[in-house]
């Protein structure tokens, strides 16, 4: 009788422990890699510009330098939709030579890899380290095809 009185709480504790929720731990098999990296997006963009606040409207971003594409290409594209927020405005006040890297290109792709829509995308505020990355990526662009994840050039770029 005493034995059955101790057995019931032990069984209850085991059941409660089994039923308790715990966070799942990711494993290498279940972790998905992105379809395209930042470098792939930059290489496949239709246009890449360095932008800053406009002279007439300091709250709107306007192209300051074209890294990919032409002036005629930019004239055909929609206006840059991004506003200069307070954090970005503070960065421009601290260093008027700073720039925001923007791309225009495909955003969504279907299963066959066709682009469904195109739009402007704000990538990052350019820093000296990111400028070096852009220069290295620009030199690798000639031999590196977007989506080629086993390219020796791609591996060498990210290894550096």
Image: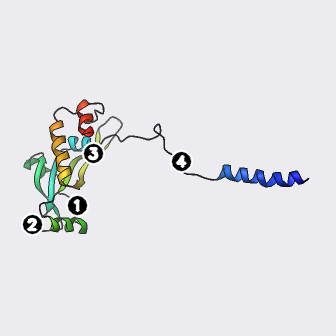
Q: Residue at x 77, y 50 (%)?
A: 11
Mark 2 is surrounded, within 10 Å at the Cα level, by few (under 14), some (14 to 19) or many (20 or more) other residues, namely few
Relative image position of residue 149 (x, y in whole percent): 30, 33
- Closest to the camera, between mark 4 and mark 3, is 4
Q: Are marks 1 and 2 in contact (CB under 8 Å)?
A: no
Q: CA distance from mark 3 to mark 2?
A: 30 Å
User: Can you give x and y, in whole percent of width and height, for residue 143 in the image?
Assistant: 18, 31
Marks 4 and 3 sit apart, C-alpha to C-alpha, by 28 Å
Res 55 label: 2
Which tag, 1 or 4, sits closer to the chain's start? 4
Residue bearing the label numbered 3: 38
* Rendered residue at 16%/67% (across/down): 94
- Residue 138 occupies quadrant: top left
Task: Give the farthest residue toward the left.
Answer: 71
Q: CA distance from mark 1 to mark 2?
A: 15 Å
Disc on res. 24: 4
| Disc 4, SS | loop
């Amino acid at each position: 009788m005493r034995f059955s009185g101790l057995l019931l709480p032990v069984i209850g504790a085991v059941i409660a422990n089994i039923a308790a929720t715990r966070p799942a731990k990711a494993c290498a098999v279940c972790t998905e890699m992105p379809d395209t990296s930042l470098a792939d997006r930059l290489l496949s963009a239709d246009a890449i510009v360095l932008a800053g606040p406009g002279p007439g409207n300091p709250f709107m971003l306007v192209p300051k330098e074209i890294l990919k594409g032409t002036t005629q290409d930019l004239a055909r594209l929609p206006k840059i939709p991004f506003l200069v927020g307070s954090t970005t405005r503070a960065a421009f006040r601290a260093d008027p030579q700073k720039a925001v890297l923007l791309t225009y290109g495909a955003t969504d792709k279907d299963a066959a890899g066709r682009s469904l829509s195109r739009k402007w995308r704000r990538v990052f505020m350019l820093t000296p380290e990111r400028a070096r990355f852009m220069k290295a990526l620009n030199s690798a662009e000639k031999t590196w095809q977007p989506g080629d994840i086993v390219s020796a050039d791609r591996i060498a770029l990210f290894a550096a």
